[in-house]
Amino acid sequence: MNDFEPKIIAFVCNWCTYAGADLAGTSRIQYPPNVRIVRLMCSGGIDPIYVLKALLQGADGVLIGGCHPGDCHYQSGNFKARRRVAILKKSLERLGLDPDRVWLRWISASEGQLFADTVTEFVKFLKEKGPNPFKTLQAL
Amino acid sequence: MPARIGVYICHCGINIAATVDVEEVVRFAQTLPNVVVARHYTYMCSDPGQALIKQDIEEYKLNRVVVASCSPRMHEPTFRSVVAEKGVNPYQFEMANIREQNSWVHSDVQAATQKAKELVAAAVAKVALLEPLEEREVEITPAALVIGGGIAGLTAALDIAEAGYKVYLVEKEPTVGGRMAQLSRTFPAMEDARHLLAERIKQASSHPNIEILTSSTLREIEGYIGNFKATILRRPRYVRADRCTACGKCAEACVLAGQIPDEFNAGLSRRSAIYLPFAEAYPPVYTVDPQNCLYLKEGKCGEGDTPPCVAACPEGAIDFSQKEEELERKFGVIIVATGFDLFDARLKPELGYGRYPNVITALEFERLASPDGPTGGEIIVNGKKPQSVVFIHCVGSRDKTVGNPYCSRICCMFTAKQALLVKEKLPEAKVTVFYMDVRSFTKGGEEFYDRARGEGVLYRRGSVSEIYRKGDKLIVRADDTLLGRPVEVEADLVVLATGLVPRKETEDVALLLKLARSADGFLAEAHPKLRPVDTASDGIFLAGTCQGPKDIADSVAQARAAASSALMYLIQGKAKVEAVTSKVDPEICSGCGLCEAACAFGALKLDPKRKVMTVNAVLCKGCGACAVACPSKAIQLSHFTPAQTMVMVEALV
Ligand code: FES
């Protein structure tokens, strides 16, 4: 499984993590090309069905990125996201999906390096974990 | 009407095209559903690039457009207005970020091209489902908040006030004036800095549109462009402004007179616990320093019940019963002008600052050279006039060992000025400058540097490794990088050109206003070239050194730019805000109220008659929290609906 390249779908908020990813770009900080970003306005807008959809379709990992606690552009969206993701992870388990494939991280607009590091780390983690079993299911 | 999509892939010069095979992406885009035309071009944002889109909209009857280029945070507004010009709803436009989030962060052409294709496919899938939206406008409260009363803040405040708008200028110190008040003369014109500043303070303080709030800090700011509200905390001065005549008798009577290091003189002189920061301070009202005042600290001062300062004041102006006040102000725009701190020279222990009294910082030199300074403008150290003075450039700048790789931009020039001041005040003194490079890009700067050398200032290229004491002299040891050998220079006085660092409160300011900081720790502008005074938040602008090291001229230029950017909103009286809000489908909504509880802005109300939720579009900020809370998807965030997001996921996995 050495040449396994995991696919990560990232749902990130417009104000912090998306801007942080942009900063990684303007600072030319390199990270693996395995991530695909979907912009939400706020991490509080992360609907569990998005995560489910991504995993069931075969994404190897889902990264949810928001502002640090207290920094949400909409006051409390990230707290809502935190609660929802916690509940979602429990339900994933019951559905036979691996909750460890879902990461929730706070990355601010000035943390380009942290964004790059997070993706790098997640890719490494997923490489060790191996492909999402649903991927093969899809292929069948 | 079926979707007719045009797709445009930008090369961004070579920024994208060097890493992404743009032709391949175009070929791929042409195969995507609903795509009528796909092209690539060197710079989509340029005039010819925009013309290309406009022409295609007409020719191919496009009703939706995708541009794959930089971040939407950069050019989404540009392209939205391009398509709007040709009658396409600006919200039926989507961007694929293939620069910041692709070509700039990956180097493998194949992988980056593949990623670009998927991002384009996702954008095409989403754009096909986007609904037309109406742009909303908000009214702008015709007032501005300026944070910081240094030269930048004062200048910005004056420009806005002159244009006829109210300005609240908040300064945390007891006086406005900032760092410039401490400077002797300006470079390269050698004007009296104090005089220039005093004039500006006078203009600002007498302007009917400016309310200056000193000894004040911001506790909270809420709202958004056009409708900000601040809670300001004003500390007591313990002196009544309506009575104080600034006669100074209180300071003379103070038990601690001559004992407290005077920050205005960079600690080179001592003041009382009740003081006026400097002669031209505004407001011209004495202030009690609560950190030191014995009466405030211990409840008693002097022999009797009345503290000596109170007894000495002929006007009865001192009032220890004053309390902290909380003020509220409303305004439409904000200018941040919070300034800089100086690098702490103690962090370079080899230079001996803090150990040898005749090693001083540039700011301390400014105080020595100022007529209102502790020596009346004479260069006197340890009671003597130095005969040999050494200046050292780049202390705490361009120095990775202290975490400051950047150039502080002003030290080369202020050192040349200080060297000239030594030559002027002590013509016999030998003056040596140790430099890494001399950067004299200021207008008139190179000529000024030439003048310093012409007047006998010796410039030696080299980095100083150590300063040590020998008898009553200092020895500066350096590697002369031109001669290629170590040298030692004897000095009576060493002046360290300490660099500029972000103010220690920068973090608080950034948190309060939700501003980004750049890698050097200063506040980040929205774009380094094209939006140098804007921030990523609408209606908040940067002026002066809070954004990065600058000289007075540049600070003033930026302050005036920030003021005019702010005035654009104030004059229009309204600003466009995102049309992206939540919408309720009354057919599906059961009125359960779960979304109402999820809304942080009180934008949702149940219509008691129809038993369905309603959205107040002005209060709705478009975060989408309500949509997630709704069990039946009856409320959705337009432009970010589940359907639109799901097709993206489909295209990306
Ligand atoms: S806006 Fe970033 S988490 Fe809410």
Image: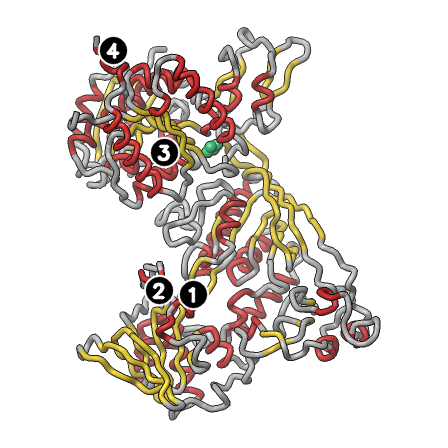
In the image, residue B255 above or below residue A133: below
Across and down, in percent, residue A26 comes to: 31, 44
Number of residues whose C-alpha sits closer than 10 Å to that of mark 3, classed few (under 14), some (14–19) or many (20 or more): some
Amino acid type for the residue under numbered disc 1 = Phe
Q: Are marks 2 and 3 in contact (CB under 8 Å)?
A: no
| Residue designated by label 3 | B72
Q: Are marks 4 and 3 in contact (CB under 8 Å)?
A: no
In terms of sequence position, does the residue under pointer 2 or pointer 3 come before the other?
A: 3
In terms of sequence position, does the residue under pointer 3 or pointer 1 come before the other?
A: 3
Viewer can see residue B61: no
- Between marks 4 and 2, how big is the CA–CA gap? 58 Å
- Between marks 3 and 1, how big is the CA–CA gap? 37 Å
- Between marks 1 and 4, how big is the CA–CA gap? 60 Å
Across and down, in percent, residue B337 comes to: 51, 55
Residue at 55% of width from left, 69% of height from top?
Answer: B197
User: Closer to the camera: disc 4 or disc 2?
Assistant: 4
Q: Are marks 2 and 1 in contact (CB under 8 Å)?
A: yes
What label does residue B397 carry, if any?
2
| Residue designated by label 4 | A137
Viewer can see residue B441: yes
- Between marks 2 and 1, how big is the CA–CA gap? 8 Å
- Determine whether the residue tagged by mark 4 lies in a helix, strand or loop: helix
- Between marks 4 and 3, how big is the CA–CA gap? 36 Å
Across and down, in percent, residue B4 comes to: 30, 16
Q: Are marks 3 and 1 on the same chain?
A: yes
- Determine whether the residue tagged by mark 2 lies in a helix, strand or loop: loop
Chain of residue at mark 2: B
Across and down, in percent, residue B120 comes to: 27, 25
Amino acid type for the residue under numbered disc 3 = Pro
